[in-house]
Image (spheres, rainbow, N blue to C red):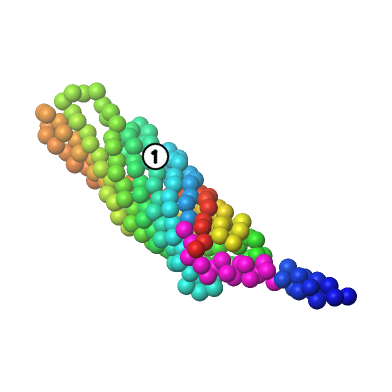
Amino acid sequence: MKFRPVLAVSVAIGLLLPGAFSYGQSRRLAFSIQAGGAGHEENNLNVALAGGLSLTVPMTKRLSVTAEIDYWNTGSQDSSYRKLNKGRLAVTPILLGVKYEFEGNGYFTPYAVAGAGYVGTKFHIGSPGSIPEVTIDQSVRSGWAAFFGGGVLWHLSAFWDFFTEIDYLIRTAPAQTVTCDQNLGTTIDDIWVNLHVVYWKFGLRFLF
């Protein structure tokens, strides 16, 4: 008979712990490391492996502010008119967002995130042609972008979460093609590069 209070307390803790665990996690600073793939809408650009770091700062029970930096380096194919030539495009998004966590079950928590930031870009052109008298160079301008997405947190322990997320990055970047012909002079052509990206990522986050 004397074990009944202990049993009752144990059952109560078992029923309340998932909710308390979920609430406690949403109120703590979190650092994340992530990897995944970045798929560009521009069909001239390849899918690239991506990685990054992020920090989540809780504001309320469900709302948090996120800061994130990512990186990927993708190849461009042989171009058609007013496209990037064959080469490598490095992309570095630095993003600030607001995350909203929906009601979870104590183990899995779905969430949505949206925000904006600065996207750094650097393009290294390949071998654009075989005519010695003509040299071609291209550049892609860095600038501002918006993003939105969603994901799911899987609470592994009091200090670790696994997560998977899909984001959509929105940016169209101005670019230039500079052609130097020893006979005809220099020509500058202003073009636009579609940098809209679907970024799928997964990783671990540590809660302080």
Where's the N terminus, which quadrant? Answer: bottom right
| Left or right of residue 157, residue 119 in this image | left
Indicate the position of residue 199 as horizontal and vertical percent values: 47, 49
Question: Residue 125 sits in which quadrant?
Answer: top left
| Left or right of residue 95, residue 150 in this image | right
Looking at the rendered structure, the secondary structure element under dot 1 is strand
Residue situated in front as seen by the camera: 99 or 5: 5
Residue neighbourhood size for the residue with mark 1, other residues' Cα within 10 Å, grouped as few (<14), some (14–19), many (≥20): many
Residue situated in front as seen by the camera: 85 or 87: 87
The secondary structure that dominates the magenta segment is helix
Q: Residue at x 19, y 41 (%)?
A: 188
> Farthest residue in the right direction?
1
From this viewpoint, is residue 15 visible? no
Residue 18 falls inside the magenta stretch: yes
| Left or right of residue 129, residue 38 in this image | right
Magenta residues span 15-31
Residue 111 falls inside the magenta stretch: no
Q: Which residue is mark 1?
A: 74
From this viewpoint, is residue 54 visible? yes
Question: Residue 154 sits in which quadrant?
Answer: bottom right
Question: Residue 73 sits in which quadrant?
Answer: top left
Q: Residue at x 39, y 54 (%)?
A: 69
Residue situated in front as seen by the camera: 106 or 36: 106
Give the residue type at disc 1: Thr
Indicate the position of residue 68 as horizontal and vertical percent values: 41, 57
Indicate the position of residue 75 as horizontal and vertical percent values: 38, 36
Q: Residue at x 68, y 69 (%)?
A: 17
8 lies above or below 137: below
56 lies above or below 134: below
Indicate the position of residue 152 as horizontal and vertical percent values: 58, 58
Q: Residue at x 48, y 55 (%)?
A: 32
